[in-house]
Image (cartoon, rainbow, N blue to C red):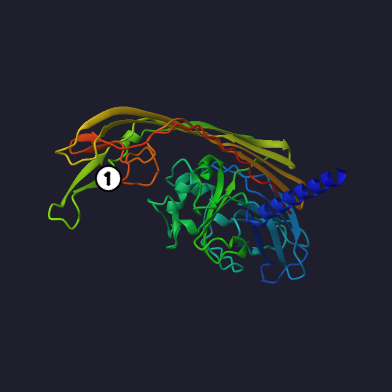
C-alpha cells in the first residue's frame, strides 16, 4: 500500500513539474541590452545601472495596464555591455549611478515587449552633469538585431486608444496581415487559415485542440490585458504547432500603488445593421424529368432583441511593498437574446402554410474571475501565479443555427429559424435547453 501511494505521489509531482515547465517555456517577458559609453565613444566597464518600472505621469495617456512594480540592478562587463533578462512587458526607467567621475544618466520610458530584446545604448557625461533622455520621444527606431521574428505588439497605451470590442481578440483586426474569417470564426495571419494559429495567455497555450482556433471562453476581457502580440514568422520551435501565427497575451499585474477600475458597458443588437439576405431554392420532380421545376426566393433574417451588459471591477496594489503585489478582476459578460419565430411548411410561396409561432429567450453569461500574484523575494528572482475562472452559463435556449445576429453558429440551409420569407416569417429549427459550466485554471509559472 505504501509503495502504491509513493508511486501516485511521484506521478503527481511529475505532472506538476511538467505542466509548470511547459508554462515557463512560453514567452511572457522581454529584455533590455546595450552598451554604456562616454562622450568620446569609449566603453565604460563596471558601471552600475538600475532598472525600475516607469511611473505614470499626468501628461501621459491613461492606460488599461497598471504594470507591475519592478527594480533590478546590473553592472556592465569589461566591454561596457549589459543585458537584463526576464523583464515583464511595460515601460521602464534605466538609470546609471554617478561614479568614477561620471554623472548620472537617466533614460525614461524604455519599452519592453514580449519576446523582444530592446536595444539601448547609454551615453554618460563626465563630471556631475545629469542627463535625462525620454526614449518614447526619440526619432530613432529601436531595432532588435538579435531576433529575426516578424511580430506586432499592442501595448497598454495603444490598447487604450484603439477601437475595440469587449474581448482581446477584437484587437487582432488592427494588426497588419491579420483578418477575421467570418465563416470559421478564426483569424487568418499572413494568408494562413484560422486553424493554423497558436494562442497563449500568460505562457499557457489555450488553443482549441480540435479546431485550432480560440475558444470563446478564452477571449478574455480587455480589462485583464496588459499586452497583445502577434508573431507571423520567425518564431521559436516551442510553437511548433503553429503554421500561421502565434498570438500571445500578457495579463495585468499590480504595483506599489493601489489602483481600481469600476464601470459598465452596454450593447444593443437592435442598433446593428440589417443581416444579409439569403437565397432558398425549391425543386420538384426528378432532375432529368420534363416535369422538373425549380424556384428560388430571397428571405431576410430578422434581428434579435435584447441588451448585452459588460460590467467590470478591478483592484490592484501591494501586499508587501517591493516584494509582493496582487491584481484581481471580476468582469462578467452577459448576453440577453430574444427571438420571435414563425414556422411554415418547407414549400414554395404558393403552397406554403403556417404551422406555429414561438418566442425563444436565452441569457448567456461568461464569468471571468481573475487573480494574479507577483512576488520578488530577491533581486534576481521573480515569481508569478495566475488563476482564471471562466465558465459559461446558459439560461434558456435559441435555435441552434440562426440567421439573426443572436448566434455565431455557421449558416446551414437544413434549418432556417427566424426568417422573413416572401413577406411572411418562416423557420425550421430544433430546440434544446442546456446549462453548462466549465471552470478552468491557468498553470502557475516562475521566471528568474
From this viewpoint, which residue is outermost toward the left? 290
Viewport quadrant of the N terminus:
top right
Q: Residue at x 39, y 39 (%)?
A: 400
Decide: few, some or many residues near mark 1? Use Cα within 10 Å; few <14, some 14-19, many ≥20. few
Q: Say if 444 sits above or below 426 in the image.
A: below
Q: Which residue is mark 1?
A: 276
Q: Position of residue 207 (x, y in %)?
A: 54, 52
SS at mark 1 in the image: loop
Q: Position of residue 180 (x, y in %)?
A: 41, 53
Q: Position of residue 114 (x, y in %)?
A: 59, 56
Q: Position of residue 355 (x, y in %)?
A: 25, 30
Query: In this rendering, does residue 295 appear at all?
Result: yes
Q: Say if 226 sits above or below 258 in the image.
A: below
Q: Residue at x 71, y 64 (%)?
A: 82
Q: Residue 417 versus residue 86: which sits nearer the camera?
A: 417
Query: In screen coordinates, is 443 left or right of 432?
Result: right
Query: In screen coordinates, is 299 left or right of 20?
Result: left
Q: How many marks?
A: 1
Viewport quadrant of the C terminus:
bottom right
Q: Residue 168 versus residue 241: which sits nearer the camera?
A: 241
Q: Say if 385 sits above or below 121 in the image.
A: above
Query: In this rendering, does residue 175 appear at all?
Result: no
Amino acid at each position: 500500500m505504501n509503495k502504491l501511494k509513493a508511486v501516485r505521489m511521484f506521478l503527481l509531482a511529475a505532472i506538476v513539474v511538467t505542466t509548470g515547465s511547459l508554462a515557463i517555456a512560453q514567452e511572457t517577458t522581454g529584455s533590455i541590452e546595450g552598451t554604456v559609453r562616454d562622450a568620446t565613444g569609449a566603453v565604460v566597464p563596471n558601471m552600475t545601472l538600475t532598472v525600475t518600472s516607469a511611473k505614470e505621469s499626468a501628461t501621459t495617456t491613461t492606460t488599461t495596464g497598471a504594470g507591475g512594480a519592478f527594480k533590478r540592478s546590473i553592472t556592465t562587463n569589461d566591454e561596457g555591455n549589459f543585458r537584463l533578462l526576464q523583464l515583464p512587458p511595460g515601460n521602464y526607467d534605466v538609470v546609471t549611478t554617478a561614479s568614477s567621475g561620471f554623472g548620472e544618466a537617466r533614460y525614461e520610458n524604455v519599452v519592453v515587449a514580449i519576446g523582444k530584446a530592446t536595444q539601448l545604448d547609454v551615453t554618460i557625461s563626465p563630471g556631475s552633469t545629469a542627463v535625462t533622455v525620454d526614449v518614447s520621444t526619440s526619432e530613432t527606431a529601436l531595432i532588435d538585431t538579435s531576433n529575426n521574428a516578424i511580430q506586432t505588439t499592442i501595448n497598454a497605451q495603444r490598447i487604450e486608444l484603439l477601437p475595440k470590442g469587449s474581448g482581446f481578440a477584437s484587437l487582432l483586426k488592427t494588426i497588419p496581415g491579420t483578418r477575421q474569417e467570418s465563416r470559421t470564426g478564426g483569424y487568418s495571419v499572413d494568408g494562413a487559415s484560422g486553424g493554423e494559429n497558436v494562442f497563449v495567455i500568460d505562457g499557457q497555450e489555450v488553443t482549441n485542440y480540435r479546431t485550432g482556433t480560440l475558444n470563446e471562453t478564452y477571449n478574455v476581457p480587455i480589462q485583464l490585458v496588459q499586452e497583445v502580440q502577434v508573431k507571423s514568422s520567425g518564431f521559436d520551435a516551442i510553437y511548433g504547432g503553429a503554421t500561421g501565427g502565434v498570438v500571445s497575451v500578457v495579463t495585468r499585474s499590480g504595483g506599489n500603488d493601489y489602483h481600481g477600475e469600476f464601470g459598465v458597458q452596454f450593447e444593443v443588437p437592435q442598433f446593428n445593421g440589417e443581416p444579409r439576405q439569403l437565397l432558398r431554392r425549391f425543386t420538384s420532380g426528378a432532375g432529368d424529368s420534363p416535369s422538373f421545376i425549380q424556384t428560388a426566393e430571397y428571405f431576410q433574417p430578422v434581428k434579435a432583441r435584447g441588451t448585452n451588459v459588460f460590467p467590470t471591477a478591478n483592484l490592484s496594489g501591494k501586499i508587501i511593498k517591493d516584494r509582493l503585489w496582487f491584481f484581481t478582476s471580476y468582469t462578467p459578460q452577459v448576453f440577453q437574446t430574444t427571438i420571435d419565430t414563425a414556422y411554415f411548411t418547407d414549400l414554395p410561396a404558393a403552397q406554403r402554410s403556417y404551422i406555429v409561432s414561438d418566442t425563444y429567450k436565452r441569457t448567456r453569461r461568461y464569468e471571468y474571475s481573475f487573480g494574479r500574484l507577483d512576488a520578488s523575494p530577491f533581486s534576481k528572482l521573480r515569481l508569478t501565479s495566475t488563476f482564471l475562472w471562466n465558465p459559461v452559463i446558459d439560461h434558456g435556449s435559441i435555435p441552434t443555427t440562426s440567421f439573426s445576429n443572436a448566434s455565431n453558429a455557421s449558416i446551414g440551409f437544413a434549418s432556417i429559424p427566424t426568417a422573413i420569407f416572401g413577406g411572411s416569417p418562416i423557420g425550421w429549427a430544433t430546440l434544446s435547453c442546456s446549462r453548462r459550466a466549465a471552470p478552468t485554471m491557468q498553470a502557475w509559472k516562475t521566471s528568474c
